[in-house]
Structure formats: C-alpha cells, structure tokens
Amino acid sequence: MTASEDGFAPKNWAARDSRTTPLIGVRARTDVDLALKYLTARSEAPAQYALGAAAAYHWAMGRAGRAPLTGTAVRLVPDLRLLTAEVDAAVVQLEDPTTEVGLRDFTRGVHDALAWVCGYSDSRI
C-alpha cells in the first residue's frame, strides 16, 4: 500500500490550518503520529530502516529525549532548526563510505522520516 492509497496524499496535508493544528516541522502532529502508526503496521521496510524512521518520528514528536543520530538532548518537541540539523547529520553519515550497512539503513530511515517532517520531501515513509 502506498501513501496515496491509504489517504495520506500531500493534498490532504495542505488542507490543514496550521494556526489551529500543532505542527512538528511543517507537518501536523496528527500526520506525524499517523506516519509512525503506518510504519509500525507494515512489514515491507527493512528492519534497520524502519527502526531509524521510528526513532526519528518518536524524537520529532518529543517522545525521546535525544536525537537518534547526534544525541542532541531536547526537553520537548524539537523545532525545525534541530530537525534540520539532524537531517544534515544523516546526510554526512550517509556520504561516509565507511558507514556499516546496518547503520547506513538506520541512518537512511532517520533521514527519510525527518526529511518528510521538515518538508524537504513529500514521500512519507
């Protein structure tokens, strides 16, 4: 099932009123929560990739005290600046040819999830 097949098409996200809907990055909190639920309900994603994406979503929603890659501590929901910094850290790690395969998959999951949260991608995981 793809994102558009399960009702998560980008046109649905744009219709939300950001003045009344709490945002995480540029996404509505409810959309991020649904993305996490969707991720944990499907099994086609490689394990480490899915774990990375789940860790990213948990951190972005303020449910984890430390960022999944950098370990940056936050007390509440990280702002767009911190989310973007974590995306940048993922890019650096992914460009390192010595990164191990399992860690690379985890990092790719973090990157892809946070890139969507920040609005750099329309592809929800």
Image (tube, rainbow, N blue to C red):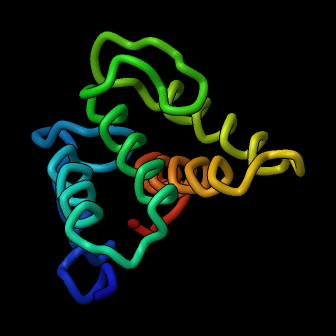
Say if residue 122 shows up in the picture: yes
- Image quadrant holding the C terminus, namely bottom left
Q: Nearer the viewer, residue 11 or 65?
A: 65
- Image quadrant holding the N terminus, namely bottom left
Residue at 60 percent of width and 48 percent of height: 107
How many marks on residues? 0
Toward which corner of the image does residue 36 lie, by quadrant? bottom left
Toward which corner of the image does residue 19 lie, by quadrant? top left
- Residue 102 percent across, percent down from the top left: 63, 53
Left or right of 85? Residue 91 is right
- Residue 90 percent across, percent down from the top left: 66, 42
Task: Check the image and report above or below for 35 versus 24.
Answer: below
- Residue 48 percent across, percent down from the top left: 50, 56
Q: Nearer the viewer, residue 6 or 52?
A: 52
Residue at 46 percent of width and 68 percent of height: 122
Residue at 32 percent of width and 74 percent of height: 43
Q: Nearer the viewer, residue 55 or 102?
A: 102
Residue at 26 percent of width and 51 percent of height: 32
Toward which corner of the image does residue 38 lie, by quadrant? bottom left
Say if residue 14 shows up in the picture: no
- Residue 55 percent across, percent down from the top left: 39, 41
